[in-house]
Amino acid sequence: MERPAHDHLDALNTVRSGMPQDELLCDLADLFKIFGDTTRMKILFSLFEAELCVHEITALLGMTQSAISHQLKVLKDAHLIDNHREGKTMIYFLADDHVRSIIGQGFEHITEEEHSHEKDL
Amino acid sequence: MERPAHDHLDALNTVRSGMPQDELLCDLADLFKIFGDTTRMKILFSLFEAELCVHEITALLGMTQSAISHQLKVLKDAHLIDNHREGKTMIYFLADDHVRSIIGQGFEHITEEEHSHEKDL
DNA sequence: CTTTCATATGATTCTTTATTCATATATTAT
DNA sequence: ATAATATATGAATAAAGAATCATATGAAAG
């Protein structure tokens, strides 16, 4: 029995050496998971333009205040946004410019449709 | 009743103008959703290093062949990977270098812990 | 053409997660 | 202290998604 055209052992060793730790991969997936929701994506895009209070975001997205607050918490726990109080209202803002660049990269992938494939889900 | 320190109408108008279409936001979230899973993240990292067949990926990740095939389908439907047949085996490879840069950005956010916050989920 | 090897896929199960509802907390004004 | 406003949160519900199991397809060897 001859060696297959595609040498398994070689490939596997090459790959294993470049693979990050499990925990890091998990953290990375958890980070992207946060961008993987339309509501949160809208909130982030909103905060690209201005600092906003909960009521404003609620109005912008046309959702319940509770839903927004829950998602704001998710985003804050992930350190993607932060907030400060101003009287009775809570002002939320982007915590980090990584957010812009991460979303920017995704945006490029979506828009630069070199393949012109119409999202065939 | 005076204007609040935080002018709502102004902010809302600024934001609305910069907000992409709903469908685009949805596509963007859908893209990130795909990166938001440890198994898929591992598959992508594997393919960073080499083209691999299903059996190899299965061995690398220590999961069932079925689970891997299902996730490969998800990745392929999103045009993040592609494949070609080689005899009986299917070789998978990255479809696009955007994948590297998107993951790269996320990686930076995770590793550059300027905040030194230990993932307090 | 039957068997074997490699991969794909449909259906089901189990888990995760987004939203809602009701209620709690916090700040300011009366 | 009470009321009003702004936001947060716990519990429940519903929907999405990942892994499993059994089975199907597809290529090649005998």
Image: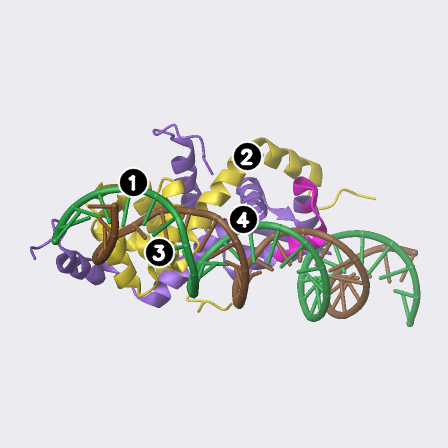
Chain colours: A purple, B yellow, C brown, D green
Residue most toward the left?
Answer: A2
Q: Amino acid at mark 4?
A: Asp
Q: Amino acid at mark 1?
A: Ala
The picture places residue B121, in percent across and down from the top left corner, at 51, 67
Secondary structure, mark 4, is loop
SS for tag 3? helix
In this view of the protein, which residue sits in the foreground, A104 or B83?
Answer: B83
Magenta residues, start to end: A58-70
Numbered tag placed on residue B23 in the rendering? 2
- Residue type indicated by callout 3: Ile
Chain of the residue under label 1: B
Residue at which label 3 appears: B68
Spatial separation of the CA atoms under disc 4 and disc 3 = 24 Å
Label 3 Cα neighbours within 10 Å, binned few <14 / some 14-19 / many ≥20:
many
Left or right: residue B110 versus residue B45 is right
Q: Which mark is residue A37?
A: 4
- Disc 4 and disc 3 on one polypeptide chain: no
Indicate whether A68 appears above or below B119: above
Q: Quick one: B12 or A65, which is closer to the camera?
A: A65
Asked if the residue at tag 3 contacts the one at tag 1, i.e. Cβ–Cβ closer than 8 Å, the answer is: no
Magenta stretch contains residue A118: no
* Image marks 4 and 3: residues in contact by CB distance under 8 Å: no
- Crowding near the residue tagged with mark 4, few <14, some 14–19, many ≥20 C-alpha atoms within 10 Å: many
Q: CA distance from mark 1 to mark 3?
A: 17 Å
Q: Are marks 3 and 2 on the same chain?
A: yes
Q: Secondary structure at mark 1?
A: loop
Q: Nearer the viewer, residue B46 or A51?
A: B46
Q: Secondary structure at mark 2?
A: helix
Residue at image point 39% right, 36% down = A108
Q: Which amino acid type is marked by label 2? A: Glu
